[in-house]
Image (cartoon, rainbow, N blue to C red):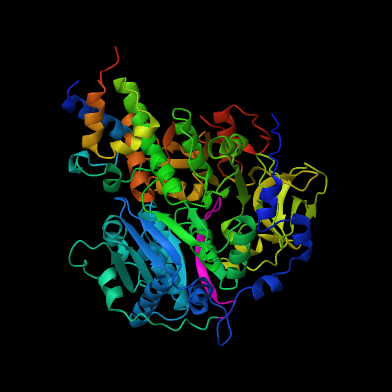
């Protein structure tokens, strides 16, 4: 069915940061956006300076920067001045540990205040910050730390024992492990973070980083090969800042809640940097999703801007079906969603439950910031990701046999979503993977790997992935990473991993396994393989379901046809089978 | 069903979903998800399986109150957990 547009009221349009889309697109320049930031006193640009120091120097140090709510409802507040001191302490600690410019500081943490100290302190010190998803198992953690040559890891004592300690000695680049929440003496070879921070000097002169100096390394997954480390530089802050204002309607004094996990790019770009450069107060909840808790946070904290994700919205909808108590959220002005396309039912449900629609937007680890969005002052077509941000040129392209691409202008023509490079937060490379990076750019376009359409009004519509990457609960999962771990098991001859549609999480991971000759795929072996995968990969990445086959369908060149497995699982047309050589059994 | 029977059913279903868990090492009083690696989908799947095995309706809104094994067992017992006929 087609959903009627959600029209914006004149007062909503008048109150929005971005009032007149066409005019702002015409007037926009990245140079002007850059001029809104201060830059370092002696020249150069540093994300943490724009996020913290600039506000403190301008007399806004007493404003609330971060309100942290613990699982047990403990509240810890940090003003801009206090958060700056904590970041300074962390930067001084890094220096005292011998960390120098460009060194890699990794975090493996849930939502703790120390995560924010570490991210901002590392940037202040001129180090490179890399967040990891704390639900990863040891294997994805180790792979990402090896690729990025991690020098410092900030994690908790529990996560360290569970996921890092056993192989830590093999990582020669790793010089220091800092632990939060140590129950007693820090384990051998680690340092307890809180006491070390308390001893560190609260003053720090932010490193004189240049705009093109590497600041952030964010990992993402492709269909094949190892995880990719997307390199971002300090200049990205220009995009973080202005897209927060235009796409999320952020303004000084807002009470802003970004529910994204800090282990992914959203948790950094819009969970830390953009809100702070825009002078808002962050709400951070340590606990996992819980519908009742979320209701109480939205209400009690008077959240004004809320940035969340489709999986969470759909879980709230499920609870709503049983409990239609209205949300009492008069302060809530803007609600946005990212991670995967937000289904139209969920966009519209926002109006029913909150009196406001959700605004879906689209971007990727590689783009560093929001590229396409539904804006506060623009009518929403439910199910669409919206229109390109001012400063962003998007297009739909088709790949040609000669390896080049051609833009397709016809409304609702299917093609690959592409962007004209030039915005400040575009990745500067995949670390140590020049060839994979180069392949993302063809004919003056950055190719996103997402299939989409554009309608006659310029709204973009997501269709699917051009590759086999799985998106579960907003997290990209590379099938190869999962298959590799399954293949390590002695019983497995072949493995293929696909994503199957799921009403809540978008997709769930399912594995197909062919066993070595003579072995029987029974329940005991299924459990053994599942346990093996979960231990190595973590629950968020491991398959939820494993099916046994005698043989997996393969092409003549021996490549497993994941798409065919998926089509058969879903009862869809099998498509072109001319390359199929070895049939599924 | 008594609490020991209910606990045995939970153990059985957990072993199906997350076979890597060493059930005997769990502290029943502590938050289950802080002791083992279960994502929110695993936890929902566990509650769905318990609903089917024990005939107890578990509204989503109650999920947060069932964080520890002890609270889960007590909840299921109070709501009259019974094996399907």
Question: What residue do we see at 26% from left, 31% from top?
Answer: B10
Quadrant for residue A580, please give it: top right
Q: Is residue A223 one of those drawn in magenta? A: yes
Question: What residue do we see at 52% from left, 50% from top?
Answer: A306
Left or right, residue A219 beside residue B25: right
- Could you say where residue A369 lies in the image, as x and y percent from the top left? 60, 60
Left or right, residue A460 beside residue A51: right
- Could you say where residue A43 lies in the image, as x and y percent from the top left? 58, 85
- Residue bounds of the magenta highlight: A210-229
Instruction: Between residue A484 and residue A202, name the one nearer to us.
Output: A202
Q: Is residue B68 one of those drawn in magenta? A: no
Task: Name the outermost residue toward the right.
Answer: A410
- Could you say where residue B48 lies in the image, as x and y percent from the top left? 37, 28
Q: Is residue A58 above or below residue A258?
A: below
Q: Is residue A364 above or below residue A472?
A: below
Left or right, residue A219 beside residue A9: left
């Amino acid at each position: 069915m087609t959903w009627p547009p959600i029209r914006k009221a004149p007062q909503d349009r008048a109150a929005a940061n971005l009032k007149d889309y066409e005019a702002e697109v015409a007037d926009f320049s990245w140079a002007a956006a850059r001029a809104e930031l201060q830059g370092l006193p002696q020249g150069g640009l540093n994300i943490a300076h724009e996020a913290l120091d600039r506000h403190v120097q301008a007399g806004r140090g007493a404003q609330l920067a971060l309100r942290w709510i613990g699982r047990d409802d403990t509240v810890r507040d940090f003003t801009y001045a206090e958060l700056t001191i904590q970041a300074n302490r962390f930067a001084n600690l890094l220096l005292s540990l011998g960390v120098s410019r460009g060194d890699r500081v990794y975090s493996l943490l849930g939502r703790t205040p120390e995560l924010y100290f570490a991210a901002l302190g590392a940037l202040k010190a001129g180090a490179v910050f890399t967040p990891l998803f704390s639900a990863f198992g040891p294997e994805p953690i180790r792979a990402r730390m090896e690729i990025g040559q991690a020098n410092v890891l900030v994690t908790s004592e529990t996560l360290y024992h569970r996921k890092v300690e056993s192989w830590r000695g093999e990582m020669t680049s790793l010089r220091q492990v800092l632990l939060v929440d140590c129950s007693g003496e820090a384990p051998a070879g680690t340092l307890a973070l809180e006491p070390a921070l308390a001893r560190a000097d609260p003053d720090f002169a932010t490193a004189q980083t240049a705009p093109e100096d590497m600041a952030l390394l964010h990992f993402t997954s492709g269909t094949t090969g190892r995880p990719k480390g997307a390199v971002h530089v300090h200049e990205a802050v220009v995009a973080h800042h202005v897209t927060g204002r235009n796409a999320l309607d952020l303004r000084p004094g807002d009470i802003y809640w970004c529910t994204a996990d800090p282990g992914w790019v959203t948790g950094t770009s819009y969970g830390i940097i953009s809100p702070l450069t825009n002078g808002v107060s962050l709400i951070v909840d340590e606990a996992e999703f819980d519908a009742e808790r979320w209701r109480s946070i939205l209400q009690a904290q008077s959240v004004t801007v809320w940035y969340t994700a489709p999986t969470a919205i759909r879980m709230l909808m499920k609870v709503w079906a049983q409990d239609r108590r209205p949300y009492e959220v008069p302060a809530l002005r803007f609600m946005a969603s990212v991670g995967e396309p937000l289904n139209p039912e969920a966009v519209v449900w926002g109006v029913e439950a909150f009196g406001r629609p959700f605004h879906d937007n689209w971007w990727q680890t590689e783009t560093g910031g929001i590229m396409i969005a539904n804006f506060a002052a623009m009518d929403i077509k439910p199910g669409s990701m919206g229109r390109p941000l001012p400063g962003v040129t998007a297009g739909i392209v088709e790949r040609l046999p000669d390896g080049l691409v051609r833009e397709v202008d016809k409304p609702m023509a299917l093609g690959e979503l592409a962007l004209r490079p030039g915005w400040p937060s575009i990745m500067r490379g995949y670390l140590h993977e020049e060839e994979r990076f180069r392949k993302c750019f063809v004919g003056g376009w950055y190719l996103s790997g997402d299939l989409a359409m554009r309608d006659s009004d310029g709204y973009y519509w997501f269709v699917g992935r051009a590759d086999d990457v799985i998106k579960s609960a907003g997290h990209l999962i590379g099938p190869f990473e999962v298959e590799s771990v399954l293949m390590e098991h002695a019983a497995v001859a072949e493995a293929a991993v696909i994503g199957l549609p799921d009403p809540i999480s978008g997709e769930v991971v399912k594995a197909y396994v062919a066993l070595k000759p003579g072995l029987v795929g029974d329940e005991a072996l299924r459990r053994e393989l599942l346990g093996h995968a979960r231990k190595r990969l973590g629950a968020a990445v491991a398959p939820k379901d494993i099916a046994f086959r005698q043989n997996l369908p393969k092409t003549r060149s021996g490549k497993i046809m994941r798409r065919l497995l998926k089509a058969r699982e879903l009862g869809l047309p099998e498509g072109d089978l001319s390359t199929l050589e070895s049939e599924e059994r | 069903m008594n609490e020991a029977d209910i606990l045995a059913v939970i153990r059985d279903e957990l072993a199906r979903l997350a076979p890597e868990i060493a059930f005997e090492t769990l502290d029943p009083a502590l938050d289950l998800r802080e002791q083992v690696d279960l994502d929110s989908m695993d936890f929902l799947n566990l509650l769905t399986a318990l609903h089917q095995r024990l005939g107890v309706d578990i509204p989503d809104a109650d999920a947060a109150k069932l964080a520890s094994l002890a609270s889960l067992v007590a909840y299921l017992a109070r709501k009259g957990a019974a094996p399907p006929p």
